[in-house]
Amino acid sequence: MLQWAHAGEPGHTFVLVGTDGKVLWVRDYGAPENGGLMYVPVSALIKEIAARLPRA
């Protein structure tokens, strides 16, 4: 997953993978363009994940 990480370094990169194995969403929160955050509120992650889950 380092291909999506800022400068190829380990960081705060989150990946959501579908049941078919396809990457649905990637966000490197540590990257400057994403605010350079060292902490991501759980509520922000839940919002991103919920937006990509199939509706029941």
Image (cartoon, rainbow, N blue to C red):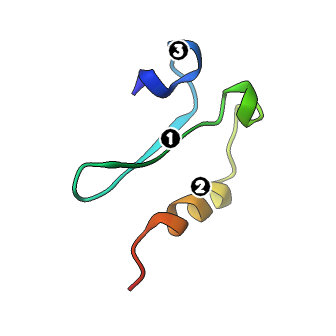
Residue 17 visible in the picture: yes
Q: Tell me the residue that label 2 is attached to.
A: 45
Left/right of residue 18 with respect to residue 36 in the rendered view = left
Q: Is residue 17 left or right of residue 30?
A: left
Cβ–Cβ under 8 Å for marks 1 and 2:
yes
Question: What's the mark number on residue 9?
Answer: 3
Disc 1 from disc 3: Cα separation: 13 Å
Q: Is residue 21 left or right of residue 38?
A: left
Question: For the residue labelled by badge 2, is the local secondary structure a helix, a strand or a loop?
Answer: helix
Please report the residue visible at 59 percent of the width from the left and 55 percent of the height from the top.
45
At label 1, the amino acid type is Phe
| Disc with the residue nearer the chain's start (1 vs 3) | 3
Residue drawn at 57 percent across, 62 percent down: 46
How many residues crowd mark 1 within 10 Å: few (<14), some (14–19), many (20+)? some
Q: Residues within 10 Å of mark 2 (few under 14, many from 20)?
A: few
Per the image, label 1 sits on a secondary structure element best described as: strand
Tell me the quadrant of the picture where the C terminus can be found.
bottom left
20 is higher (above) or lower (below) than 35: below
Residue 8 rendering spot, x and y as whole percentages = 50, 14
Give, as a three-letter code, the residue at label 3. Answer: Glu
Residue at 50 percent across and 41 percent down: it is: 14
Q: Residue 2 occupies which quadrant of the picture?
A: top left
Q: Amino acid at mark 2?
A: Leu
* Residue that sits furthest to the bottom in the current view: 56
Of mark 1 and mark 2, the one earlier in the sequence is 1
Q: Residue at x 72, y 36 (%)?
A: 34
What is the quadrant of residue 19 in the picture? Answer: bottom left
Mark 3, other Cα within 10 Å: few <14 / some 14–19 / many ≥20 = few
